[in-house]
Image (spheres, rainbow, N blue to C red):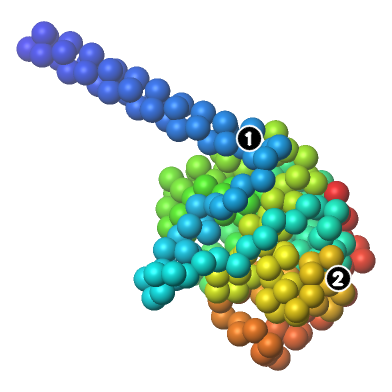
């Protein structure tokens, strides 16, 4: 009996050890990619691949609209609008807005369901670069780990540059340049304040809005964002 218990204990320890090593290897893989993308521009992301696969279920020749653009060639209006809409404390936090998280938890508890989130731009970038759209505690934990990696390796300017180039702005439309040309027929550098605020307003649910069409809610939301843009700090 004692021998059996010893073998069982050793097997458990061995299994835990293998699990720890496997988790460490996975995190090392993520970290290596974060280091690489600090100086190299990704041609695609995990989320972009998911969307492309979905499009190709309807059209096997489907392609994404995406063109990389350097940070300085993206309209400052769009940078301010996205920060004002998605993450007002972006420049000052270290990846997580704890006050917003607490408010979201309290609101969700009052409603009895998830009606509010508090993801920062860094967290959204972590998800877009590496993860699927599935919701689970394990995925949220991995998102947090990658967010820490991004913040520890990259400058805020680089994080925002990446985010603006991989964010989804319509069916098969990714990045600021493709979004500006698709929705307004202008390059991202030429976006004005109103156009930038409109693009920021559709970020949470870009597939709900058809090009050239608006709604009362969307117009109101864009106006609120535009009113906040002057206070937004950009890196």
Dot 1 surroundings within 10 Å: few (below 14), some, or many (20 or more)?
few
Name the residue located 78 percent from the left edge and 52 percent from the top edge.
70
Q: Can the viewer see residue 17 in this picture?
A: yes
Question: Quadrant location of residue 186?
Answer: bottom right
The N terminus sits in image quarter: top left
Q: Which residue in the rendered view is the most extreme toward the front?
A: 61
Residue at 68% in and 88% down: 212
Q: Disc 2 designates what residue?
A: 190
Q: Residues within 10 Å of mark 2 (few under 14, many from 20)?
A: many
Question: Between disc 1 and disc 2, whose residue precedes?
Answer: 1
Depicted 173 relative to depicted 194: above or below: above
For the point 48% across and 57% down, the residue is: 49
- Element carrying mark 1: helix
Check the image and report above or below for 51 versus 13: below
Determine whether, in the image, residue 123 is placed left or right of residue 137. Answer: right
Q: Is residue 75 left or right of residue 215?
A: right
Which mark, by number, is residue 7? none
Q: Position of residue 90 (x, y in %)?
A: 77, 52
x, y (%) of residue 31? Answer: 57, 32
Residue at the spot of label 1: 36
Q: Give 131 or 216, whichever is nearer the viewer.
A: 131
Q: Compared to 228, does 69 lie above or below? A: above
Kind of element beneath mark 2: helix
Q: Residue 26: give x, y in percent of width and height.
A: 45, 32
């Amino acid at each position: 009996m004692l021998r059996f218990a010893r073998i069982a204990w050793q097997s458990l320890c061995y299994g835990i050890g293998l699990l720890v090593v496997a988790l460490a290897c996975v995190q090392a893989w993520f970290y290596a990619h974060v280091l690489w993308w600090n100086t190299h521009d990704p041609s695609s992301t995990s989320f972009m691949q998911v969307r492309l696969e979905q499009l190709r279920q309807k059209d096997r020749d489907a392609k994404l609209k995406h063109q990389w653009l350097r940070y300085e060639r993206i309209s400052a209006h769009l940078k301010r609008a996205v920060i004002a809409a998605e993450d007002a404390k972006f420049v000052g936090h270290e990846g997580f807005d704890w006050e917003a998280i607490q408010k979201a938890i309290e609101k969700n508890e009052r409603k009895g369901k998830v009606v509010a989130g508090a993801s920062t731009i860094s967290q959204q970038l972590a998800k877009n670069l590496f993860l699927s759209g599935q919701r689970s505690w394990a995925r949220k934990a991995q998102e947090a780990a990658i967010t820490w990696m991004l913040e520890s390796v990259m400058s805020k300017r680089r994080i925002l540059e990446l985010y603006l180039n991989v964010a989804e702005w319509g069916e098969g439309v990714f990045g600021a340049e493709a979004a500006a040309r698709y929705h307004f027929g202008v390059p991202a550098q030429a976006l004005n304040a109103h156009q930038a605020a409109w693009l920021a307003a559709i970020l949470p649910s870009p597939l709900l809005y058809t090009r050239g069409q608006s709604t009362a809610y969307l117009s109101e939301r864009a106006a609120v964002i535009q009113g906040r843009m002057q206070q937004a700090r950009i890196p």
